Amino acid sequence: MIIGHLAISVLESHYLDTDIGPTIAGGLFPDALDKSLCQVLNVSAHGRLWGHTVLGFALSTVIVGAARGKRAAGSWALGYVSHLLADLEAPVPLFHPFAAYAMPESPSITETLHRFATDPTKLLPELALTIWAIWVLVRSRRETNR
């Protein structure tokens, strides 16, 4: 879920000293692209396609690097890779369109939220990551204000 990807990006940015904006953007981009194409625009039946590929990663990282520089591209790449790794519990078409994948159709947003909210194996780790990320942000802000 998006909250977990956001939390992981915040934690990466803090502990690995990356730029927070590009790290978060890279961490959210695969779902922003693919879920929009699938559930909003109805262009794809899969919520994991172009954004969840090595090709999508490489092209977007080059674009970010050209637009914002090497540090931003590195931050983006870290967020992006962590997103792909976090999604590996289910099929991820990493080498699409160069390899064929049997991808299941994506459930609706409502069905996804229901599954997530009723499955403690998904909810508890995401909740723990979110609490940790909030704690890190609050602590960092306090240190900055001293």
Image: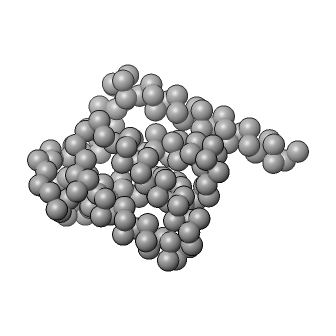
Q: Position of residue 72 (x, y in %)?
A: 56, 65
Residue 141, quarter of the rendered image = top right
Q: Position of residue 30 (x, y in %)?
A: 36, 56
Q: Is residue 55 visible?
A: yes
Q: Is residue 35 visible?
A: no
Query: Viewer-proximal residue, 130 or 50?
Result: 50
Q: Where, quadrant-wise, is the N terminus in this rendering?
A: top left
Q: Name the outermost residue toward the top.
A: 120
Query: Viewer-proximal residue, 24 or 32?
Result: 24
Q: In the visual, does 66 lie left or right of 112?
A: right
At 26% from the left and 53% from the top, the residue drawn is 94
At 51% from the left and 42% from the top, the residue drawn is 8
At 34% from the left and 32% from the top, the residue drawn is 116
Residue 133, quarter of the rendered image = top right
Residue 100, quarter of the rendered image = bottom left
Q: Position of residue 26 (x, y in %)?
A: 46, 57
At 61% from the left and 54% from the top, the residue drawn is 18
Q: Where, quadrant-wise, is the C terminus in this rendering?
A: top right
Q: Name the outermost residue toward the right.
A: 146
